[in-house]
Amino acid sequence: MNWTTRLILIALVAFAAALGGTYAGRVLFAPERQSETELHALLHSELELDAAQEAKIEAIEQRFATRRKALELEMRAANAHLAEAMELEHGYGPQVTTAIDHTHKVMGEMQKETLEHLFAMRAVLRPDQAAKFDRSVTRALTPEVR
């Protein structure tokens, strides 16, 4: 195989890997958005929150929105770093492994902070509201089990 053919093959593999990483990132975060929408609708229309609860939950949501944006930016940077490592190594080498570990760390932080956000909102609810909230969270986390 000549040098030009190798270079083209390497470029195609790197491009495919970058597309795969982008697709995986979008798939991983898409379900969360749908669940957030369902929970938001539940909180603001079905649970009959009083004014104090609305204010507390709005403050919690605003704090989390800011933090979520920061984590999403960090996730994009981690994905870019992974793509760079894949382009440099053209295989599952030490730089790719390190980049994957960092990506997983950021995903874990996002999941932990999302759960902290959910529990903070739940703490504002009355017991009857919390029961409905819990059912909605369970449905959102186990859509294929339903």
Image (tube, grey):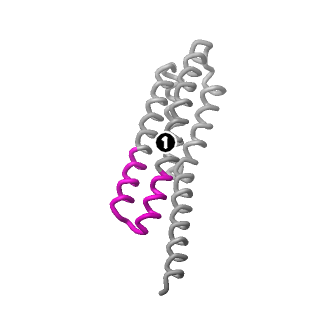
Name the chief secondary structure element in magenta: helix
**Residue drawn at 51 percent across, 31 percent down:** 67
Q: Which residue is mark 1?
A: 74
Q: Residues within 10 Å of mark 1 (few under 14, many from 20)?
A: some
Q: x and y percent of residue 106 in the render?
A: 43, 43
Q: Position of residue 139 (x, y in %)?
A: 53, 42
Residue 40 in magenta?
no
- Residue 139 shows in this picture: no
Q: Please, what secondary structure does the residue beneath circle 1 have?
A: helix
Which residue of the protein is positioned furthest toward the right in this rendering?
A: 45
Q: Is residue 84 magenta?
A: yes
Count of numbered tags? 1
Q: Amino acid at mark 1?
A: Glu
> In this picture, is 108 found above or below 42?
below
Residue 65 sits above or below residue 74 on the image:
above
In x, y percent, where is residue 89? 40, 66
Residue at the bottom extreme of this rendering: 1
Above/below status of 91 relative to 54: below
Q: Nearer the viewer, residue 65 or 115?
A: 65
User: As drawn, is 78 to the left or to the right of 53?
Assistant: left
Residue 91 image-quadrant placement: bottom left
Q: Nearer the viewer, residue 98 or 141?
A: 98
Residue furthest top as drawn: 52
Q: State the image quarter where residue 59 is shown.
A: top right
Question: Residue 143: x percent and y percent?
Answer: 53, 48
**Image height of 15 relative to 138, above or below:** below
Q: Which residues are magenta?
A: 79-105
